[in-house]
Amino acid sequence: FAQSNYKPGYVVDLKNDTLKGFIDSQEWAPNPKTFTFKSNLNQSQHQSFSIKDANSFGITGAEHFQKFIFSKSTAPTDLNKISTHLDTSRTRDTSFMKVLVRGKNVSLYKFTDPLKTRFYIISGKKDEPEELEFYIYYINEDQITYQTLYPFRSQLQHLADTHNVKGSKLSTKIKYAKYNEYDIQNVVELINGGPSAQNLESYKVFGLRVFAGGAARFNKLE
């Protein structure tokens, strides 16, 4: 069992009320579906939240997570597990995604489950994030030669074109981007106008009303 590590944070409930207190900060890989909260550090028992009773939560000034219902690819990308054909199958899931960028044009999220890590974007007024797609599979049964597909590059270029963001630096970064947090976040930040244009405020971004944690109703985790 992970040791408790409570840090100042917030919870946004299903009514979009923001509750300030302390979140038990963990590694959260895979992404969490539950987390624990205390309104103050003197509380003897913690309180439990899940995807059923919270919209978002975060560690103030550090990590932020937002709940989504979304579609996810089910093909592995580990060379020890990939198939001998292109697998584009998908399934539905509900979880808290890690917020990487909250921008004026595009917001970027990260979701990891036991299978793999995926990156998601939201642009415009959409409510459901779109997965940035990446596939890898063996070309034949000998499982030696494999094919790698990078649809996410075209998706990022489409976003840049949609928001009329141009430039050789951006085009080059998109063309050679790898499917990792550093490269994709770099591109999204450029589409939003640069790192200084990003917005990762704490609870004020997510909630409409702020309450002291002690005034809220919670479910206890036994």
Image (cartoon, helix red, strand yellow):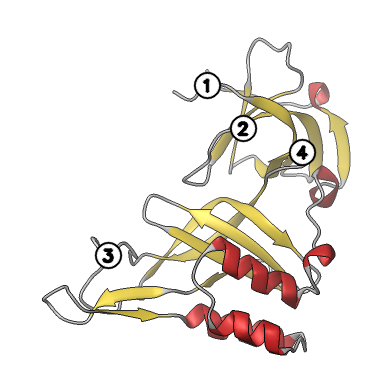
Q: Of the residues under marks 3 and 1, which one precedes in the sequence?
A: 1
Q: Position of residue 162 (x, y in %)?
A: 72, 87
| Amino acid found under the numbered disc labelled 4 | Thr
When the figure is inspected, residue 69 is found, relative to residue 169, above or below; the finding is above
In front of the other: 151 or 179:
179
Q: Which residue is mark 1?
A: 3
Q: Secondary structure at mark 2?
A: loop
Q: Which residue is mark 4?
A: 60
Residue 16: give x, y in percent of width and height.
79, 46
Q: Nearer the viewer, mark 2 or mark 3?
A: 3
Q: Residues within 10 Å of mark 1 (few under 14, many from 20)?
A: few
First in sequence: mark 4 vs mark 2 = 2
Judged from the image, the secondary structure of the residue bearing numbered disc 1 is: loop
Sequence-first tag of 2 and 3: 2
Secondary structure beneath disc 4? loop
Q: Is 162 above or below relative to 55?
A: below
Quadrant of the rendered image containing residue 157: bottom right
Q: Amino acid at mark 3?
A: Leu
Q: Which residue is at 83% across, 63% downward?
A: 196
Q: Are marks 3 and 1 in contact (CB under 8 Å)?
A: no
Q: Secondary structure at mark 3?
A: loop
Question: In which quarter of the view is residue 174 placed?
Answer: bottom right
User: Mark 4 or 3, which is nearer the eye?
Assistant: 3
N-term-proximal mark, 4 vs 3: 4
Residue labelled with disc 2? 25
Q: What amino acid is labelled 1 in the image?
A: Gln
Circles 4, 3 touching at the beta carbon (< 8 Å): no
- Indicate which disc, 2 or 1, sits on the residue closer to the N terminus: 1
**What separation in Å lies between label 4 and label 2 (alpha carbons)?**
11 Å
